Image (tube, helix red, strand yellow):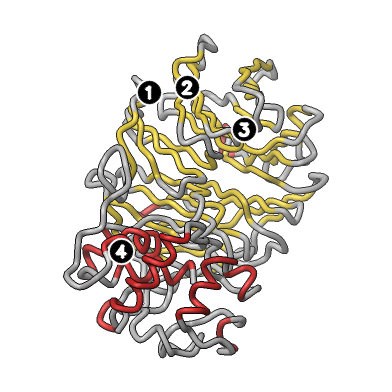
Amino acid sequence: MRAMLLLLLLSLVPPRAQAQEAVHGGPVRALAVAPDGTLASAGFDQSMILWDAAGGRARAVVRWHAGAVNALAALPGGMVASAGEDGRIALWPPRPGAQPLRVLEGHEGPIVALAAAGPRLASAAWDGTARVWDLGGLQPPRVLEGHQGNVNAVAFGQDGIVVTTGFDGTLRAWPEGEPPRTLAEFGLPQNTLAVLPGGTIAVGGVDGVVRLIAPEGGVRELQAGPRPIVALAASPDGAVLAAGSIGGSVALWEVASGRLRHRLEGPGLPVWSVAFAPDGRTLWTGGADRRVRRWDAATGRPLGPLGGPPGGEAEAAPVAGLDAHGARVFRACSACHALTPEGGNMAGPHLHGLFGRRMGSVPGYEYSERLARGDITWTRETVADLFTRGPDEVTPGTKMPIQTVGNAEDLAALLRFLESATR
């Protein structure tokens, strides 16, 4: 039902406007920026959103993966790769449809990181391996084995050599045709890495320390804070490093001097992803507040979230005969659901005729196995139960994002809105 919330808001407006008002239905887990500035975000709501970054509005919302989307990579020609909890990598064209152009399979656990370099794509997964895929040919992937436990991050380093880090606390390089090399051992799990121009590798760990490993092997430490570092990004010129933490802040460091330039204080929630714009002037962040936020990288000033006006959430436009309070609550659902048949099936099915409808019965929508059983009829009571306990409790095994409405007045307003808007 949480996913249904998103569907309803979208169908109140024409399809183009629906895309403009898109927001994620769960934490934003990954960001990727193409050389032309195109921005992609993905998250725990199983969706990927492509943004018109200059206009601050979404171009497309895609929901294909069977689970959280943990990783993105910008590919040549405007394509985007996405990967996640289902262990699959999907390759999308610049204007994505309902299905990817190609699917890469082979990992036996969730994929948590992607990196691209020309026709090569690297993936890191919790099956203990990383893989290197040749996107231009039909060769099987190169499987990189040796880490003890989850591989949490992957990147292309100097001369195109793949580097990885993970739960075992090691940083490893994988030259093609040669044995792997252990570049450093930290003794604590490492969550993320970034390669700077010149070959320095930045690694972020569970101890809140960012370590800079120079090509000759020297190590410098930047103390970002007491909370684990889960996201790193370097500016295009390598002069500034951004580090996002579980604590909800982002530290901007001057790499040469090691000086802390700014600490961006967000909503006090985990910041799962950071990325610089191609010109280095804008920093994008994504986290548990479900928003993609933009910052002035030079001053640290917030520039507002995407999908809404700067400085706050977008307000729903009033619609005659519909509950305005409920429409605002429904905004969280609008990235995935349309309210009318004309709006079509999006990341989730349209919500027209919701009340009295059997679960899993909208024609043309590919439901998860759990919802396809159709053993629940949507009524005011069952919808309320879904949003109170959550899809993971009411329909365990569903692909719906985990999202609840904890405020009784918000829930009542949402139900009033749905009863009117879905007739």
- Check residue 300 in the rendering and tell me which mark sits there, or answer none: 1
Q: Nearer the viewer, residue 147 or 144?
A: 147
Q: Residue 288, position in %: x, y?
A: 51, 46
Q: Secondary structure at mark 3?
A: strand
Q: Nearer the viewer, mark 2 or mark 3?
A: 2
Q: Is residue 307 left or right of residue 283?
A: left
Instruction: Tell me whether the residue at label 1 lies in contact with that at label 2, contact meaning CB atoms closer than 8 angstroms.
Output: yes
Give the CA separation, mark 1 to mark 3.
19 Å
User: In this rendering, is residue 295 above or below 322?
Assistant: above
Residue highlighted by disc 3: 229
| Of callouts 2 and 4, the N-terminal one | 2
Quarter of the image with the C terminus in it:
bottom left
- Check residue 263 in the rendering and tell me which mark sits there, or answer none: 2
The amino acid at mark 4 is Ala
Residue highlighted by disc 4: 327
| Of callouts 1 and 3, the N-terminal one | 3
| Of callouts 1 and 2, the N-terminal one | 2
Tell me which residue sits at (58%, 33%) in the image: 247
| Of callouts 3 and 4, the N-terminal one | 3
Tell me which residue sits at (59%, 89%) in the image: 375
Q: Nearer the viewer, mark 2 or mark 4?
A: 4
